[in-house]
Image (cartoon, grey):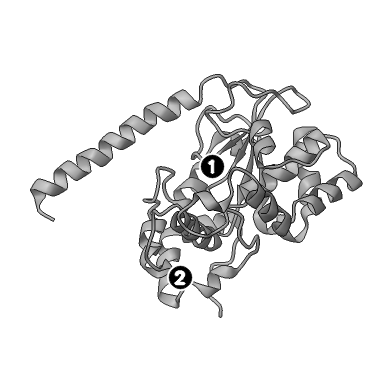
Amino acid sequence: MSQAIELPLKNRLAGARYIRSGVVYLRHRGLTANDVFLASYPKSGNTWLKFLLCQLLTKSEVDFQTAEELLPGIGHHQQSKGILPSNGRLIKTHEPYRNEYRKAILLVRDGRDVLVSYYYHNARVGRLTGEFGDSLPVLLEGKTDFYGSWHNYIHSWLDSSVYKNGDVCLVRYEDCLTTPNDVLKQICRYLGVSATDAEIQAAIDANTADKMRAKEAQGDDGIVKHKKPVFFVRKASKGNWRDYFSPEQHDLFMQKAGSAMERLGYSCEYSE
């Protein structure tokens, strides 16, 4: 690419980032000290946990539309009502840490599985068209959208003052899969929410991966609207990255994201 073409492209990207910074600022207006955030990098299991928490907080099963009303994304929170015992709102965000975030449930997932799931999400909406291996460098750099890289996202939260002060409830997606009852009890204690064992089990039973996909297919967010026949809710599993990463690709991932993996306690080994 010639310099005459490359410089305007860089300027356009810089301009887009500048515009988005203003949009993100506007989205974060109207927050209160009682608001708590459900924070995660995209494709870390946020949607599943969102459904579980909405059911526990309202004592009733929810669909995609109701869950979005009860636990809105940042920027859509202004008209939502507080559903926490403190009358605060529970608000979803994929943004890296910001000073406006005073309390948060931080949901994390093995970055290798995140990138595989994020690859399928981007294919679903038409942002990526190549194979996973071809798309890995772009995914590693976080260039498919404006959230940045997975590893920089993780560092932003773990380096934050609220995390260091103990105001963040760190939850691993893998623990949600293996010991969901324990994880939900942990979150309920953090939020000051009263939930019985039976209510927790009912929320888990009502929101299995199969039932989540059925809700998706029936709702306005069904796959028929999208370019690729891929559900937003996919396998809801762990360790599938081994089917996608070659040893060389795994080395590339660890060069970029190994420190974030270590800080979260994930194994950095490649195994067949």
Q: Which amino acid does label 1 sit on?
A: Trp
Is residue 23 shown to the viewer in this render? yes
Q: Look at the picture and state if 119 lies above or below 73.
A: below
State the residue at coordinates (78%, 26%): 85
Residue 156 shown left or right of residue 195 in the figure: left
Is residue 43 shown to the viewer in this render? no
Among the 4 quarters of the image, the one containing residue 63: top right
Q: Give the structural element (helix, strand or loop) at label 1.
A: helix
State the residue at coordinates (45%, 65%): 254
Q: Earlier in the sequence, mark 2 or mark 1?
A: 1
Q: Nearer the viewer, residue 134 or 69?
A: 69
Disc 1 residue crowd, few under 14, some 14–19, many 20+, Cα 10 Å: many
Total residue callouts: 2
Q: Does the residue at mark 2 contact the one at mark 1 (Cβ under 8 Å)? A: no
- Circle 2 or circle 1, nearest the eye: 2
Q: Mark 2 points at which residue?
A: 250
x and y percentages locating residue 60 in the rendered image: 82, 38
Disc 2 residue crowd, few under 14, some 14–19, many 20+, Cα 10 Å: many
x and y percentages locating residue 54 in the rendered image: 74, 38
Q: Nearer the viewer, residue 100 or 199?
A: 199
Residue 4 shown left or right of residue 102 in the figure: left
Q: Give the structural element (helix, strand or loop) at label 2.
A: helix
x and y percentages locating residue 186 in the rendered image: 78, 44
Picture quarter with the N terminus: bottom left
Q: Whole-Å distance between the Cαs marked 2 and 1?
A: 24 Å
State the residue at coordinates (10%, 49%): 3
Q: Which mark is residue 157?
A: 1
State the residue at coordinates (54%, 67%): 268
Q: Residue 211 carries which label?
A: none
Q: Look at the picture and state if 210 lies above or below 103.
A: below
x and y percentages locating residue 87 in the rendered image: 74, 22
